[in-house]
Amino acid sequence: MQFMKRRTFLSLMGAAALTSGMMFTGCGAGSDGDDRKIVRIGHVQSQTHPDHLGLEAFANYINEKLGDKYRVEVYPSELLGSQTEMVQLTQTGAIDFVVASTAIMETFSAKYQIFNLPYLFSGVEAYHEAMDDPEVTDPIFKTTSKAGLETVAWLDAGTRNFYTIKTPINQPSDLKGLKIRVQQSPTNVEMMRLLGGTATPMGFGDVYTALQAGILDGAENNELALTDNGHGDICKYYSYDMHQMVPDLLVANYAFLNGLSAEERAIFEEGFQIVKSTEQDAWEDAVAEAKDKAENEQHVNFIYPDTAPFQEAMAPLHDSVLAANPELQPIYDRIQQHNAAHTAD
């Protein structure tokens, strides 16, 4: 049903483009004569996901403060297309914001590779402090303006861990020969090669069907993928190897941002902070609820392996990424300062 809704929506967009001679855009007025600019935000998660809760809080805030000029609409569950499609629509201005993965943003700027490095952060505290540090994020978030995009906020996506249908993962060698879905980035493909598994990049919306059909042996993501997306109905082993802490990113159309007046931009900036704080406040409870449901209703077995062998296997990836992108070294060093401050944690 979700697939049909999304395809119908996209078909209507195409039809509108053909009949009107212009692409579906965020600046269109409503059919009811409402001449406010419609600000469209797309994401892949469900309506109960913390990302959606944060975006709804953002929409309410902007609609309250600037409701005479703007109407913010949030589209969950891939209703505007796959994540890759939505990023492309945001580039063109067909929609105004998208929640995107660092893996997709890596295709626009190599600097985003740093966030995909396994075991980049020593723990949650270091991760949050580093992501709130402009010396870490600004040199990366502002590198895609020529591509028509700018990241305006980061959202907590917890830790990424391996989960499989039949094979419990207690050590890297357990991944040998397994087809594991990863996000579509060279860094993640190389991560799986070093761990001995077979990387299978694909869009998030296709993962459930691929698991169900046996095309995949497993995937890697946070706990909410088990429950919100039903992966725990198929995958019965979830291993806390904690190989990545990768944020989700709220990405804006660059032209839209620069078209705002100074007063409007200030209000939007406050809204971006509301997205982040609302999403992060909801995250911890959402993970606890997902884990409880996965364990007690879906009968997922949670495994807690020694992470040291996984970390050791990933060391060459840090070296190769930094060697290929020397401009990342100052950012990497800054992150290590945050790690050092939380070594005891």
Image (tube, grey):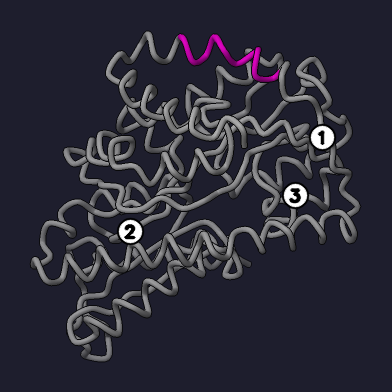
Task: Name which quarter of the figure residue 56 lies in.
Answer: bottom left
Magenta residues, dominant SS class: helix
Task: Name which quarter of the figure residue 273 lies in.
Answer: bottom left
Q: CA distance from mark 3 to mark 2?
A: 27 Å
Nearest-to-viewer mark from 1 and 3 = 1
Q: Are marks 3 and 2 in contact (CB under 8 Å)?
A: no
For badge 2, the amino acid type reads Phe
Crowd class of label 1 (few under 14; some 14 to 19; many from 20; radius 10 Å): few
Earlier in the chain: of badge 1 and badge 3, it is 3
User: What residue is pinned by disc 3?
Assistant: 231
Give residue 88's position: percent from left, percent from top.
33, 47
- Checking the image for residue 97, the label placed there is 2
Q: Nearer the viewer, residue 14 or 344?
A: 344
Residue at left offset 50%, top offset 38%: 126
Up/down of 316 relative to 151, above or below: above
For badge 3, the amino acid type reads His
Q: Magenta segment: does it hold 345? A: no
Total marks shown come to 3
User: What residue is pinned by disc 1?
Assistant: 304
Q: Nearer the viewer, residue 79 or 312?
A: 312
